[in-house]
Image: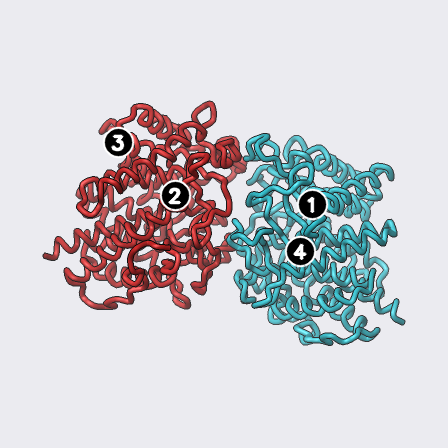
Chain colours: A red, B cyan
């Protein structure tokens, strides 16, 4: 692979269980995440994912990085543009990042942005779900998440480049999302109108994250009002006050619905939503919201941790019935990475000891099972027992996004913790 | 449970591996399937699935038969009507089946047929995908398989009862299928037109089975021409002549397409399609088609059998890449039951020794892993290791269909084998 560093420093550190963390602990963890990001994960995508011939990125990469399918999934294309533009901004003045690295990152973002600006949208500006290698549309704009990730990508990219066309694309995509949020699937919705209306946690959750991303482009009043309403919806409607369970789907008024979709829990999604809440709360210095979000993360881990094999289940039924999802017991990379982010952020913001204990447990599991010291990057899909289920580093749903984003965020949080403990 | 018989005769018989079968072998297997059908599986559904209050059937039944969700899925509702009407016709003069049993089966079919005739269709006669307990539509008629199973159900039911309205419903549903076969998802299709057209094995496969079911209602010319074209499509287009691999999706002209859907293999589906082919071929006395279908079954088993844990994989990629389906390595009840049917039918029709060897291997796996001697009926979903993944006997996709249909067909085939060996 020639990544030019010893993988030993990344792989499985069964650190410090139950120990009180010191400044050295935090520094060593910050170092671990930084090394993994800069010397393993980014080089992997830079080396294997660029389609130099047709533009855009390959995301279906096997364990070794070899492309096994050339279709281009809009979520992942946009997420990779976002990631490189975001890291460029975050690390523009970091001593460890060379001007050449920054140029490479910017060119990588541009490589995807050009392809997407040319091929990603239909004639009315809605973002397709997927394209073939050449950019011809394969799957229609059947939901709004392609538009969400387009707004995020082009917002970051416009901030880096100052390009007006990128800014216009970002705003168009953002307004697509706002316009379609109450009927996200449009004509492709199979639900019969009126019998059992449900709304999905994904919508306010993504709006919270997206709106923070777009803060530089939005009127302050619009920004604050969207943030306030997403907090109210997530914490006041999807979170059940009695059980403190965060549901994936509820009735439009927030009441619980006793059906498969209504009983569905998606622990990783819930935990990710909670760190979005913490990010908004930190910005607003809302300590109560921070504390509530941390409590919900801990509550989710209590019911979603697999006591038998370790790891966090993918789906559960709130009443313990068999879920519809056959993959319910699998262990997914993003679930564990978002949990690491939530726990380190929660610990930094609250010093809640349970956060630290859970952090160690999840760190131990995630770094020993998902990271691949042999070929780089992280496996995406493990079976319940923790064995590799799909021998890949990228596919239709896994691209250059959750791994590097989480590695960066954990690095930054541990850096702050180290600085705070000095 | 009080099923009134010893379960020992049903559970796991690790019989006769590699032995030459005798008339006693066939008689004992016929007996095993007959007992399982009449004394275990039918009583389970008769006891637990009828919604006496609102009509139709409960299909979401936990291991013990307790209903955990009351939604009514049209595939499963129609399949249960079909099953009871079909068994009524098949066993109307069988000495072991009492007039009271027959009356119960007919009433059970009627119970579902009345509910479905009242609530199952939209105003243009298309069949919904699901209803709530009261019969209010939940999910739109987004594919044609609801109509397929409605045609099968009402055709059988009309044959038993002679009711003209049932006959009219069957014909309407059959013509829905013929009309929509080239665009089965209609407005709900997410595929962008023209970029990469694909057609699915499911359509000709279900048409083959459905058309045989409707033979009494169709003009002989239409019947034979539909059967001929389904044979040509399945054996001439979905089956690759070089590799002898049966694909799940191909281009409209039958050529292979190198994408996730185009590489997808669904071994259970392929094997089920092959026994539909054998059924048509037996009717037409087409020995060449019988032999080809048997060869394809054996070929599928060669590549789809899990050498490590036993059982047949749910999905595979033709080129060995990671499939999109996270549940690819799971072991599903219907896959194994349809394989038992195909193997016993294939052995009866050809005396191919490989069929008999495979039959024993699959029998051994299926009866030891799926059958539940403690609470009756069969588990539906096992993980790769063969452990129960969902603790249920019925759900959104598993109802009163594959288990009893396969038990009956295996029983009948072994009866014929026993008679032929006398």
Q: Is residue A215 above or below residue A58?
A: above
Q: Nearer the viewer, residue A36 or B60?
A: A36
Residue B295 appears in the picture as rendered: yes
The chain that hosts pointer 1 is: B
Residue B144 percent coordinates (x, y): 66, 39
Q: CA distance from mark 4 to mark 1?
A: 29 Å
Name the residue tied to disc 3: A159
Q: CA distance from mark 3 to mark 2?
A: 29 Å
Do the residues at pointers 3 and 4 share their chain? no
Nearer to the camera, A164 or A226: A164
Q: Nearer the viewer, mark 3 or mark 4?
A: 3
Q: Which image quarter is the N terminus of chain A in?
A: bottom left
Q: Residue at x 19, y 62 (%)?
A: A25
Give coordinates of residue A387: x percent, y percent. 45, 63
Query: x, y (%) of residue B187?
Result: 58, 31
- The residue that disc 2 covers is A201
Q: Is residue B96 toward the left or the right of residue A226 in the image?
A: right
Above or below, A216 against A367 in this view is: above
Callouts 1 and 2 on one subunit: no
* Residue A404 image position (x, y, % from top left): 32, 48
- What SS does tag 2 mark? loop
The local secondary structure at tag 1 comes to: helix
Disc 4 marks which residue?
B400
Q: Secondary structure at mark 3?
A: helix
Q: Secondary structure at mark 4?
A: loop
Q: Which mark is residue B238?
A: 1
């Amino acid at each position: 692979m020639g990544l030019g560093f010893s993988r030993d420093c990344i792989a499985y550190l069964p650190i410090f269980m139950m120990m009180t963390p010191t400044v050295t602990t935090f520094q060593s963890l910050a170092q671990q995440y930084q090394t993994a990001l800069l010397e393993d994960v980014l080089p992997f995508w830079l080396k294997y994912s660029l389609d130099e011939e047709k533009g855009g990125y390959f995301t279906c990469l096997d364990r070794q990085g070899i492309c096994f399918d050339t279709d281009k999934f809009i979520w992942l294309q946009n997420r990779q543009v976002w990631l490189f533009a975001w890291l460029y901004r975050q690390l523009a003045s970091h001593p460890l990042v060379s001007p050449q690295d920054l140029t490479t990152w910017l060119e990588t973002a541009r490589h995807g942005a050009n392809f997407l600006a040319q091929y990603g949208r239909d004639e009315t500006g809605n973002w397709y779900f997927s394209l073939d290698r050449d950019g011809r549309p394969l799957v229609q704009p059947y939901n709004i998440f392609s538009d969400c990730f387009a707004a995020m990508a082009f917002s970051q990219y416009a901030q880096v480049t100052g390009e007006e066309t990128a800014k216009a694309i970002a705003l168009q995509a953002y307004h697509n999302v706002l316009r379609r949020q109450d009927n996200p699937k449009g004509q492709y919705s199979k639900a019969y109108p009126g019998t059992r209306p449900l709304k999905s946690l994904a919508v306010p959750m993504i709006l919270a994250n997206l709106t923070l991303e777009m803060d530089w482009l939005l009127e302050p009043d619009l920004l604050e009002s969207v943030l306030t309403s997403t907090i109210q919806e997530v914490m006041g409607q999807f979170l059940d006050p009695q059980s403190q369970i965060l549901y994936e789907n509820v009735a439009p008024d927030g009441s619980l619905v006793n059906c498969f979709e209504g009983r569905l829990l998606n622990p990783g999604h819930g935990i990710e939503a909670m760190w979005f809440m913490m990010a908004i709360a930190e910005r607003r210095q809302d300590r109560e919201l921070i504390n509530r979000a941390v409590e919900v993360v801990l509550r989710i881990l209590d019911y979603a941790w697999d006591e038998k094999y370790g790891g966090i289940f993918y789906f559960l039924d709130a009443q313990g019935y068999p879920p519809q999802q056959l993959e319910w017991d699998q262990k997914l990379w993003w679930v564990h990475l978002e949990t690491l982010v939530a726990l380190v952020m929660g610990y930094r913001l609250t010093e809640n000891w349970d956060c630290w204990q859970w952090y160690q447990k999840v760190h131990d599991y995630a770094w020993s099972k998902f990271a691949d010291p042999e070929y780089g990057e992280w496996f995406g899909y493990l079976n319940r027992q923790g064995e590799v289920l799909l021998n890949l580093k990228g596919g239709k749903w896994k691209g250059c996004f959750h791994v590097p984003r989480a590695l960066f965020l954990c690095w930054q949080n541990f850096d702050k913790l180290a600085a705070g403990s000095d």
